[in-house]
Image (cartoon, grey):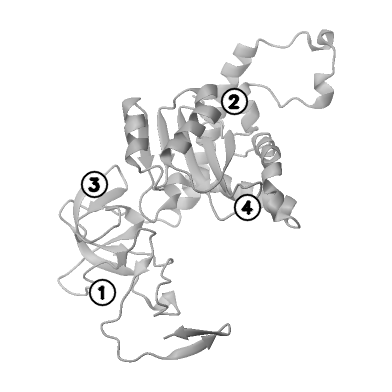
Amino acid sequence: MAWTHITMDFIEGLPKSSNKEVIWVIVDRFTKYAHFIALSHPFTSEDILELFKTHFYKFHGLPLVIASDRDRIFTSNLWKDIFAATGVKLHFSGAYHPQTDGQSERVNQCLEAYLRCLTYARPTKWYSLLPQAEWWYNTNFHTSLNMTPYEALYGQKPALLEESLLPASMLEGVRNRNQEKAVLMDTVKASLAKAQARMKYYADLHRSERTLDVGDMAYLKFQLYRHNSLGLHNSLKLHSRYYGPFRVLERIGQVAYKLLLPPISQIHPVFHISQLKKHLGPTAVPEQGLPLIDQHGNILTAPAAVLERRLIPRNNEPVVQ
């Protein structure tokens, strides 16, 4: 049913517009209907919970499941305690596997493309176009639904201005709304199942069936796309792609595994099977440990010893090497 399973994510890095610089995206996984909420830094878990009541709860009530990434807001104790007390399940995406929350990621791409096209000359005006962007997205045809999210949610096509001006006598003979919506829900379910089967077919062409057992040793594919501290390496392609091996402690669901990581690791220990490779044989160990990560997710690197220092000019300012 609608609004029982939702996803949410933040779009960061936007230019300031009316003192707003973040968009909070909430999407219903069944009807694909979305809400776009503008925010400004800094915001806390209390602020997000208040906005959740204002923009979501009063319209749709509490969902059954909320899927999100591991943002500091969604992993905070307050956020977890509030929804645990109300019986709402929180599902978090696996480390370095954003496909878990692919619904929000796809909506983010559509919203960013829409705003980019309308505000390319004046990017600081995106806030005034956000309501229009939400209406555009929710009234656009979705191939997975074979209809618009608006129609999937309300059981009728989005009303045009000309239709709203028609006299009531011309609208006689319209079918019962409840019956229409029941038929529409069946159509939505069938369309979603067909679209999911099609996407799974093409995705499976590039996948291989792999499983691990508890106690196995596995290498972890660690993506160093945030490696920017100290500038010790100019090319990420020369870094190790796999670290480990690490012991498999537990199987989570069908495609995720919990690893025994070093105590100093600040990475969530549950990974999708696509990030793991089974260790075969007693040799060929590329890396024994994981790189250290700070609270912002940047890789911490440090030289074994400093042999010499020098000053070089960069942008007309001295920089220490």
Q: Which mark is residue 286?
A: 1
- Percent position (x, y) of residue 234? 45, 80
**Lower sequence index among marks 4 and 1:** 4
Give the residue at mark 3.
Answer: 251
Q: CA distance from mark 1 to mark 3?
A: 24 Å
**Lower sequence index among marks 4 and 3:** 4
Q: Which mark is residue 51?
A: none
Q: Secondary structure at mark 3?
A: strand
The residue under the point 67% across, 22% down is 156
Q: Is residue 173 above or below residue 234?
A: above
Give the residue at mark 2.
Answer: 153
Q: Nearer the viewer, mark 3 or mark 2?
A: 2
Amino acid type, residue under disc 3 in the picture: Arg
Query: Circles 4 and 3: CB distance less than 8 Å?
Result: no
Q: Is residue 144 above or below residue 239?
A: above
Q: CA distance from mark 4 to mark 3?
A: 43 Å
Q: Nearer the viewer, mark 4 or mark 3?
A: 4
Q: CA distance from mark 1 to mark 2?
A: 52 Å
